[in-house]
Structure formats: structure tokens, C-alpha cells
Image (spheres, helix red, strand yellow):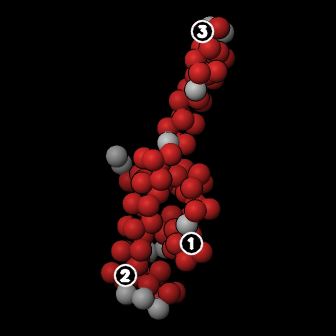
Amino acid sequence: MELLEKKNYFIQLFDLYGSILTKNQIEYFKYYFEEDLTLNEIAILNGKTKSASFDAIDKICKYLENYEEKIGMLKYKVKKNELVEKYLETKNEKLLEELKEL
């Protein structure tokens, strides 16, 4: 997965599962992924080391991936959107049945 794809993936996961994270985790995530701060900048803002900032971001990403693995909301959302797009292009009624089965 390319860097930009990976970033977008984690932002999508955050949109779905971010409310499960702690206030501190949300802050770290937003600094790194939304404000595009470096690990060093995040460390300075939080009075931590660069290594601690890396560990925090890594842990948050693992949490988000774990939530997705267990709950699967992003996978469901992607599949649903694909079926809707295909239906709109083809008007194939069979695709509506697949949507109902999701």
C-alpha cells in the first residue's frame, strides 16, 4: 500500500471508529494525519519524545485496524458503494438483491 493510500485508509478508519479512541489518541491522530505534523513536532507539543510519539501513532493505527478486522464497517461500506455504483450504471435488479443481503 502506497503512503497516500495508507494515509487515506487510516483516515477512513478514523472516521468510522474514531469515537472509540481516547481524547489523547484522537489528538495524536489529528496532529499526524490531519495536520500533517512530524513526529518531532508532535513530541514537542505533548512534551514527549519522538519515539513516544511514534509509538502512540503506531498503537492508534493498530487499534483502528483491529476494530476494522472485528467489526468490518469499512469493508461493508466499500462493498455497498461498489454495488450502488454498478447498479446505477447497469440498472441490474440482481444488484439490488445483493444490496438487500448485505
> In terms of sequence position, does the residue under pointer 1 or pointer 3 come before the other?
1
Q: Which residue position is annotated with label 1? A: 22
Relative image position of residue 96 (x, y in whole percent): 64, 15
Q: Which residue position is annotated with label 2? A: 52
Q: Residue at x 53, y 30 (%)?
A: 79
Three-letter residue code for mark 2: Ala
- Left or right relative to 45: residue 91: right
Are dots 2 and 3 in contact, CB under 8 Å?
A: no
> In terms of sequence position, does the residue under pointer 2 or pointer 3 come before the other?
2
Q: Which residue position is annotated with label 3? A: 94
Relative image position of residue 66 (x, y in whole percent): 42, 54
Residue 22 visible? The answer is: yes
Relative image position of residue 87 (x, y in whole percent): 63, 16
User: Comparing marks 1 and 2, which lies closer to the viewer?
Assistant: 1
Q: Secondary structure at mark 3?
A: helix
Q: Quadrant where the C terminus lies?
A: top right
Q: Residue at x 34, y 46 (%)?
A: 1
Crowdedness near tag 1: few (<14), some (14–19) or many (≥20) residues, C-alpha within 10 Å: few
Task: Tell me the CA gap for discs 2 and 3.
Answer: 51 Å
Q: Secondary structure at mark 2?
A: helix
Instruction: Check the image and report above or below for 50 versus 66.
Output: below
Crowdedness near tag 3: few (<14), some (14–19) or many (≥20) residues, C-alpha within 10 Å: few
Q: Between 61 and 42, which is closer to the camera in this rendering?
A: 61
- Left or right relative to 22: residue 38: left
Q: Residue at x 36, y 48 (%)?
A: 2
Instruction: Check the image and report above or below for 19 versus 77.
Output: below
